[in-house]
């Protein structure tokens, strides 16, 4: 129960006790007053009748006696008036026929009135001529007291309502600073930092507000320092200091998983050499060379999408890895890069070998040294070409069925959705004890007994409505899977960045969340990190929608880009999934330090961390030392897993 409610209850109880006490005192006083008033009236009445009746008794005027008694009875509230004449034993009596009160029976039992009787002997000279007896009418007293009670009760109810309204308003005003403190405390616990709480005039609250503001500033400063430390470690380990591109070591961590792939996955590689930069370094014009390579790197980086890895390979060479690319795209990017370079080069520096690009398709190669040798041979061949100096080393490396163009892939996926050829495969995520924590849904197309994983065509769906259509269909398949086999849950689903920015998908997602609140514990959404680093505000709209409906979400490819991760405390995901480049080369001290810093930040924010591309138990042991509790990869196919 909140402090506000406790205050309200105790103040209400106190007010009720006081009101009841006052009400009881007033009722008791009124009851006593009416009893006393009846006694006084009876005494006064019997004295007045004594004086008024004496002449008529002396004259033995019975008519006069009756007239006086009737007049007195009608002017008062009496139960009966009886006059007994001693001479002839006759009597004159007036009596109320109906002495029933309109007040309730229970009320009469609570505040009873006694029936009062008073008698007096009337004298005629020295003789006792008659006896006068008067009784009160309790019904009148009950009616008067009941009417007074109703008026008091009405007044107290009105006053109580007014007091309650006033109390609510006053308490809200008094508790407003405390509410702000409570809100800020909750925000701090969620690592959300905002403007300081304004000071108030209340001394006690002022001290608390000052402490909360200091603590908030201190925690925010600590978090930002940790994020800056991580950024520095990543830059030191994986970033080229001149161009701010990723360096050769980072590129190798990205390339290694492609060498061990057992599927039809492929990627495109190109190596670009710029002679004018090489000449500047050879001539020891280091400042000029650094300036040239930095400017060219910025221009070339604008040609690369977020899925690709673009690095500085040597002092005058750039290297690019494009996942699942086709020949047309690889050639297109190469030509654009050469044209941009030739436009950028200073006049007089362009010759037949100013810049050249060697290309190759990485498919089924397992040795990195061989890959770089083949790529270097392609670069040598390109330098011997006329016109645009590009050369593709192994054009026939990819199976024909995987060499579709962008439009072909889009039509292929549309047809697959229509023909119900889209399927999902569940990969478990486990902890160190090999217990399944959840499953991730991987979508693929199966056409003519050929498996097309999403990696083959997802790039081709970018900037098209097919992306959100595909995600919609996958969500429906996952819902069907959860309905048919609820034991395999929770299931995570990766949503593409194009769907997040599609209005139709947002409408579909909103309707799905409202219609299926029961899925909040079994369905988890994943978004690529690029959505948060480049489109944070738009992505926050989706994450807030999920939180509003009690659904969880995670971040995929965490750490893929060199952008700052200070967005993490703003969105508070359930977990982050490490980019696979961080789970390789764990024996490298620089890589280990970067990963340790990332896990510390995630732990401080109470955000879970999942390691991907885990292939061995040794990796699990090394990652567990960094307090990473969840693992995904081909290791799950080699172990006997336990259900949660």
Image: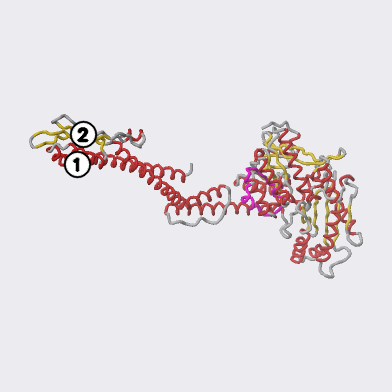
Q: Is residue 624 visible?
A: no
Q: Is residue 378 left or right of residue 3?
A: right
Which residue position holds label 2? 92
Spot occupied by residue 18 in the image (x, y as percentages of width and height) = 35, 43
Q: Specify whether residue 563 is painted magenta.
A: yes
Based on the displayed image, in which of its 4 quarters is residue 298 positioned? bottom right
Identify the secondary structure beneath mark 2.
Answer: strand
Residues packed near mark 1 inside 10 Å, few (<14), some (14 to 19) or many (20 plus): few
Identify the secondary structure beneath mark 1.
Answer: helix
Q: Residue 44: which disc?
A: 1
Q: Nearer the viewer, residue 255 or 507?
A: 507
Based on the displayed image, in which of its 4 quarters is residue 413 positioned? top right
Range shown magenta: 547-572
Report, in whole angstroms, how far the alpha carbon at label 2 lies from the one at label 1. 20 Å
Q: Specify whether residue 63 is painted magenta.
A: no
Spot occupied by residue 201 in the image (x, y as percentages of width and height) = 43, 56
Q: Is residue 114 visible?
A: yes
Q: Are marks 2 and 1 in contact (CB under 8 Å)?
A: no
Return the disc, 2 or 1, that comes first in the chain's sequence: 1
């Amino acid at each position: 129960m909140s402090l506000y409610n406790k205050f309200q209850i105790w103040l209400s109880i106190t007010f009720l006790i006081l009101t009841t006490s006052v009400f009881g005192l007033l009722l008791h006083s009124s009851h006593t007053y009416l009893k006393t008033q009846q006694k006084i009236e009876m005494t006064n009445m019997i004295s007045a009748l004594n004086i008024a009746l004496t002449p008529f008794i002396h004259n033995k005027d019975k008519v006069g006696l009756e007239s006086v008694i009737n007049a007195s009875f009608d002017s008062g509230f009496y139960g009966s008036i009886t006059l007994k004449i001693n001479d002839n034993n006759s009597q004159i009596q007036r009596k109320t026929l109906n002495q029933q009160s309109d007040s309730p029976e229970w009320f009469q039992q609570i505040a009873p009135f006694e029936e009062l009787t008073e008698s007096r002997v009337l004298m005629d000279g020295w003789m006792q001529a008659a006896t006068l007896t008067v009784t009160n009418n309790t019904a009148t007293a009950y009616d008067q007291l009941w009417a007074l009670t109703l008026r008091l009760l009405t007044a107290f109810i009105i006053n109580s309502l007014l007091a309650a309204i006033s109390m609510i308003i006053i308490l809200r005003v008094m508790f407003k600073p405390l509410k702000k403190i409570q809100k800020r405390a909750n925000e701090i616990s969620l690592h959300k930092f905002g403007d300081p709480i304004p000071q108030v005039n209340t001394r006690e609250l002022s001290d608390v507000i000052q402490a909360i503001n200091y603590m908030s500033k201190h925690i925010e400063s600590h978090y930002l320092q940790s994020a800056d430390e991580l950024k520095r470690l990543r830059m030191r380990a994986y970033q080229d200091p001149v161009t701010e591109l990723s360096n050769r070591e980072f590129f190798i961590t990205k390339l290694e998983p492609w060498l061990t792939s057992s599927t039809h996955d492929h990627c495109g590689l190109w190596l670009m050499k710029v002679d004018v930069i090489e000449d500047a370094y050879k001539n020891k014009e280091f400042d000029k060379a650094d300036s040239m390579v930095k400017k060219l790197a910025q221009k070339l980086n604008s040609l690369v999408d977020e899925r690709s890895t673009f690095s500085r390979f040597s002092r005058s060479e750039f290297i690019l890895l494009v996942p699942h690319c086709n020949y047309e795209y690889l050639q297109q990017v190469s030509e654009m890069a050469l044209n941009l370079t030739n436009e950028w080069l200073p006049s007089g520096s362009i010759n037949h070998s100013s810049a050249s690009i060697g290309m190759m398709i990485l498919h089924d190669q397992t040795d990195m040294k061989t890959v770089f040798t083949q790529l270097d041979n392609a670069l040598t061949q390109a330098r011997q070409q006329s016109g645009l100096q590009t050369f593709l080393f192994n054009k026939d490396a990819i199976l024909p069925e995987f060499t579709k163009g962008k439009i072909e892939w889009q039509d292929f996926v549309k047809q697959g959705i229509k023909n119900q050829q889209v399927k999902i495969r569940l990969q478990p995520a486990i902890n160190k004890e090999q217990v399944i924590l959840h499953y991730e849904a991987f979508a693929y197309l199966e056409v003519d007994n050929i498996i097309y994983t999403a990696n083959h065509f997802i790039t081709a769906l970018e900037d098209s409505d097919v992306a959100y259509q595909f995600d919609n269909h996958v969500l429906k398949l996952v819902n069907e899977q959860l309905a048919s086999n609820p034991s395999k849950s929770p299931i995570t689903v990766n949503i593409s960045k194009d769907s997040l920015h599609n209005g139709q998908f947002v409408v579909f997602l909103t309707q799905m969340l409202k219609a299926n609140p029961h899925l909040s514990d079994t369905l988890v959404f994943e978004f690529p990190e690029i959505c948060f680093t480049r489109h944070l505000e738009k992505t926050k709209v989706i994450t807030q929608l999920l939180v509003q409906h009690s659904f969880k979400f995670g971040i995929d490819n965490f750490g893929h880009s060199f952008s700052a991760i200070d967005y993490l405390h703003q969105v508070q995901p359930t977990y982050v999934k490490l980019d696979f480049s961080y789970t390789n080369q764990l024996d490298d001290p620089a890589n280990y330090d970067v990963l340790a810093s990332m896990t510390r930040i995630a732990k401080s924010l109470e955000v879970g961390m999942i390691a991907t591309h885990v292939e061995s138990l040794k990796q699990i042991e090394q990652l567990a030392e960094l307090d990473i509790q969840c693992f995904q990869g081909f290791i799950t196919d080699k172990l006997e897993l336990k259900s949660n």
